[in-house]
Structures are given as structure tokens and as C-alpha cells.
Amino acid sequence: MKFLRDTMTVFSREATPALRDPVSLVFAMGQPLLFLLLFGSLLDTSTGTGTWQWFVPGILVMMCLVGPMGAGHSLLVELTGGSMERMMVTPLNRTAMLVGRNLKETITLVVQAVLIVAVAMTLGFRLYPGGVLAGLLMLTVFGVGLSSLSFVLALRSQPSGALFWVVTQTLMFPLTLLSGVLLPLEQGPAWLRAVGAVNPVSYIVDAQRALFAGRFDDTSVLHGGLVAVAVALIGLVVGTRSMRRGVTTGA
Amino acid sequence: MAVTTTGLIRHFRTKKTTVEAVRGVDMDIGDGELVALLGPNGAGKSTLFRMLTTLLPPTAGTATVAGRDIIRDPDGVRARIGYVGQNHSAGDNFRVRDELVTQGRSHGMTRVEATRRADEVLDLLGLRPLAKRTPNTLSGGQRRRVDIAMGLVHRPALLLLDEPSTGLDPHSRAEVWEHILRLREELAMTLVLSTHYLEEADRMAERVVIIDHGLVIADGTADRLRKDLAGDRIALTLESKADMARIAGPFEAHGDTVHIRVPDAAAALPRHLRELDAAGVKVVAAQALRPTLDDVFLALTGRSIQEAA
Ligand SMILES: Nc1ncnc2c1ncn2[C@@H]1O[C@H](COP(=O)(O)OP(=O)(O)OP(=O)(O)O)[C@@H](O)[C@H]1O
Ligand SMILES: [Mg+2]
């Protein structure tokens, strides 16, 4: 009971500024749509209408990578200011602090995904409702794990915050580009495909493409699901432990 | 007892060295006291606060805060104390009133209760007109008042404030202090605060605890500390420097002025003047000097608190 209440307290704190500012909210939610339209129209001319089926899940995975990084950044800001410290000196449940923040990321992701799918449908994207639902569920699970890891990174980066930037900057580009989100890896040289094979994000991308094409029985779906669950578990366990240990590092 | 600490120690291990931030603090603070922790930069004030507020586990020692053990029952401590940290308590992008409501809800209040209470503390600290602003649009003094408000939402019996007035201009500082003193009168709280402004500790607190290099080096009322550790002086400026030789007893010469240590400056000044007059020594200026807390710190450490950092 207390856990749920605390989670809602943290969630509503995080969500309120956005809800109070509907104009920015609309822009933030609509931004990936812009990306979809600009980038998608480029692809359209080269590869035909199957493009949307390939491109929409890619964009969703990319959002799922960018969102958690932003969440970690906002935590970092609150750690360097004093607002996180003040919250730590309340009886607020430590896991709820993690989950409440995660909830806001998750809801943002889902709303953006629904918007993207809706717009893409008008452009020729074929909807497999079951597949899309399963795909979103997988992304949600994966996103929760990524956000938690991003929070851990922010906590560990104290007090300067430098570590957070070093790690995210060096990881984000290879993880994104070498997962086949925006460019297919299949046509790439062997080394590129090898790197793709060890990149956990690739498994999510492949699974999403299969699900968005309505292919539940594809083995990539299983692999992607396992990666998502593993990342979520690791993130939540490590994240809760870091939150318990508190805001102040220095052994 | 609002606070009891026994042998509280905290070390920080950095890459090569170990910093002994707090080196064994034993301190009792009774209910309703107003205590100022005075110490130069790096003395260990914040580290002490962070242990008392459960943010940092001690390396050794124990402490009871608001009747709860900081290690065995951290949530119990958190529920009973208010903490105004050295940094800002309210998030930059959140409205002041929203943050106050969040704070109340974090302490288990319902939304309705927390909202009512948020409005009460807004009024208490004169923040009503700023309720819908975000902290990054406020002045330093206004922002500090918001921080104090955040510490009061759940009506704690004990409020710990880490340098509530540092970085403020004299006007805002006076204003923050006025609010702190009002709170104490109206709410009968125990207040523990840190500062490195000597005059502030002197004027405002009934009890001053001086901390240096992680240890309590003096503890008492400002008057007591002054009497015991520094003492009064009188300053006499003589018309002729040559007359200095005719002063009986030890003195320090500062240019053409002599400083003489005395138990009570107000009583000693006329007596010295009479004696010198009788001896035919001309005095151009005379002054009774009360020691400052800096004199106390100087007497204890050989350093001035301003340059001790
Ligand atoms: N996380 C940390 N890691 C390493 N050293 C630390 C850490 N926090 C504090 N210290 C060191 O411990 C000592 C005491 O610091 P503390 O912040 O408690 O001092 P303070 O009295 O609050 O000073 P100020 O008046 O500047 O706020 C300092 O030498 C500081 O460098
Ligand atoms: Mg400090």
C-alpha cells in the first residue's frame, strides 16, 4: 500500500510540470512524428512501401533508447542540486523513487508509440494489432530496465556527473547505429554484423520488426523478449540497491 | 533529548588519502534548544548533518535523533525531522507549491492534507505570491525561504538547517533569520543550524558549538565562551609612544595603541584612565573591547575563522 502510494507521489511530481505546460507537451510528444515523416519519406522512394513496416519499429526502439538517457540526466540534475537529497530525508520508499520516475518514462513512450503507429498507418503501415501490442510491451519492459540503469549511472556519477556523460556518449552511438535501427546491418561487412550480434539492442530491434510484421513464431521474438526481461531485472535490482545506498557516494 | 551523538566518526576514502571529516563528536541537544554549529569551511558541519539526517552512515559511533537511532531506524528519524540542506531543496522546474505538496505526500499526508499544509507554510514564510513560480525564477533569499518551507511541511519537532543564510546579501540574511526566529517562537521547535558567520551565531543562537577539523572544540553560550576563552580588552591610544613604558603590567602594542587584557572592560577602563592620569600620561583615545567569537576561535586554534579554511 505504502509502496503504491509512494510510487504515485513520485510519478505525479514528475508528470505535473509537463501537464501544466500543454504546448511543450504536444511538441515533445509530436517530435518523433516529425522524425518519422522527414526520414521516412527519404526511405520511401528507395525501397518501396514495405519500408514503413521496417522503419516504424526502428524509430520506436530509438525512442526507447533516448528516453531513459533523458531520465538519467534529469536525476543527475536533481542529485547535483539538493532536491534528491531532500527526498532521501523523507520516509519515501526507495524502490518507489525508482519506479515512480520509470512510470513517467513508460507512459511517455507508450503515448508516443501510439501516435507514431497511428500516423504511420495513414502512410501505408499495415497494423498487426497483436504484434504491435506485444512489441510495445517488450519495449516497455526494456525501457524500464534501461531507465533504471541510467539512474544507477547518474547515482554513481556523483558528485561531478562526468561519468554519466562519458558513458552515455560512448555507448549511445554504437549501441544505436550498430543495432540496425535506422540502417540495415544485413548488407554490411562481416565485422559489422559480428558487432551487431553482440549488441543486445539488435535483438530487440529484430524482435520488434518480427512482431510489427505479425510474426509471433519468429525465434527473434523469443531472443528479444529474453534480452528485455534480463535488462529489466538487472536494472531494477541494481537500481534499488543504489537508491538504498543513498545519494552520497564516497565510501 | 532532540539529538544525542556518541563518538560519531566519518571518514571519506578518496583515491589516495583518507579524509577524516568528523573525528569523534559527542553532543547532546535538548528539546527546544536553538544551537548554532560554527566552523570554517571543511570543518565537518555538513558531514555531521548528513549523518544525523540518515544521508550518510557513520564510519563509527552512534546517534539518536528525535528519539530514533539513525542506523537502526532511519525511516523513524526521517519521519520526525526537517532538513534544510546546504543546497536547494526544491527542484528547478517544479512550482513551489507543487514541491511543497509533494513533500507533504512523501511524509504520508493525503493530497488534500498536503495541499492545506502547503498553503499554511507558504503563508508562514510569506511565500504566497510566489506559489506558482518555479525556484529558478526566484531571488536567493526567496529561494532559501522556499527551502525552509520544505523542511516544515510535516511539522517536525526538530529542524536541521545547513548554512541557511550563506550566499545571501545582508538584507536577505536578516530576513531569513527573522523567519527562523519567528518559527521558533510560534512552533516551539528545536533548531540546529550551521553557519560560518560569527556575528550571526553570536546574535541569534543561545548556544554555540564550535567545530574545527571534525571535532567540537568549544560548546556554550556565546557570552560564556567569550568570558572563558577570549576575555575583554581595553585599547588606549597614548599621545606619546614613549609613555608606553610607564604602563604597569603586560600589554600588546598595536602601532601607537596598547591593548590590555582585563576581566571586565567596562569596569577596568575608568580605573586605568585614572591611574594614567595620576601618572601624568596623556591618553588621546580609549575604548572597551568586547571579544568576538573570532577572538574565541583564535584563542582556541591560533587561526582566525575567516582564514581557517
Ligand atoms: N563525499 C566526500 N568525499 C570526500 N571527501 C569529502 C566528502 N564530503 C566531504 N568531504 C571532506 O570532508 C571534510 C568536511 O567537509 P564538510 O562538507 O562536512 O565541511 P563543512 O564544515 O560543511 O564545510 P563548508 O562550510 O564549506 O560547507 C572536507 O575536508 C571535505 O573535503
Ligand atoms: Mg557544509
Image (tube, coloured by chain):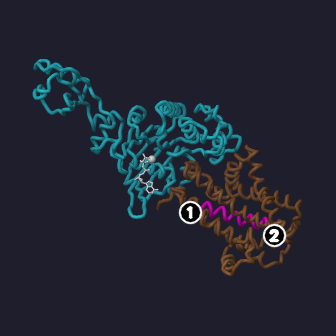
Chain colours: A brown, B cyan
Q: Please name the residue shown 62% across and 67% down the image.
A: A171
Indicate whether residue B199 is drawn in magenta. no
User: Dot 1: what SS?
Assistant: helix
**Left/right of residue A134 with respect to residue B226 in the rendered view:** right
Residue extending furthest toward the front? A45
Dot 2 surroundings within 10 Å: few (below 14), some, or many (20 or more)?
many
Badge 2 is on which residue?
A54
Badges 2 and 1, same chain: yes
The stretch of residues the image draws in magenta is: A133-152
With respect to residue B39, does A184 lie above or below? below
Residue flagged by tag 2: what amino acid is it? Answer: Trp
Report the front residue among B148 and A145: A145
What percent of the width, then of the height, locates residue A74? 63, 53
Report the front residue among A231 and B185: A231
Residue extending furthest toward the bottom? A190
What percent of the width, then of the height, locates residue A230? 68, 72
Dot 1 surroundings within 10 Å: few (below 14), some, or many (20 or more)?
few
What percent of the width, then of the height, locates residue A61? 74, 65
Badge 1 is on which residue?
A166
**Left/right of residue B151 with respect to residue B8 in the rendered view:** right
Of the two numbered discs 2 and 1 on the same chain, state the one appearing first in sequence. Answer: 2
Say whether residue B184 is visible. no
For label 2, being within 8 Å of ligand 1 is answered: no
**Left/right of residue B87 with respect to residue B257 in the rendered view:** right
Number of marks present in the image shown: 2
Mark 2–mark 1 distance (CA, rounded to whole Å): 31 Å
Q: Chain of mark 2?
A: A
**Left/right of residue A226 with respect to residue B285 in the rendered view:** right
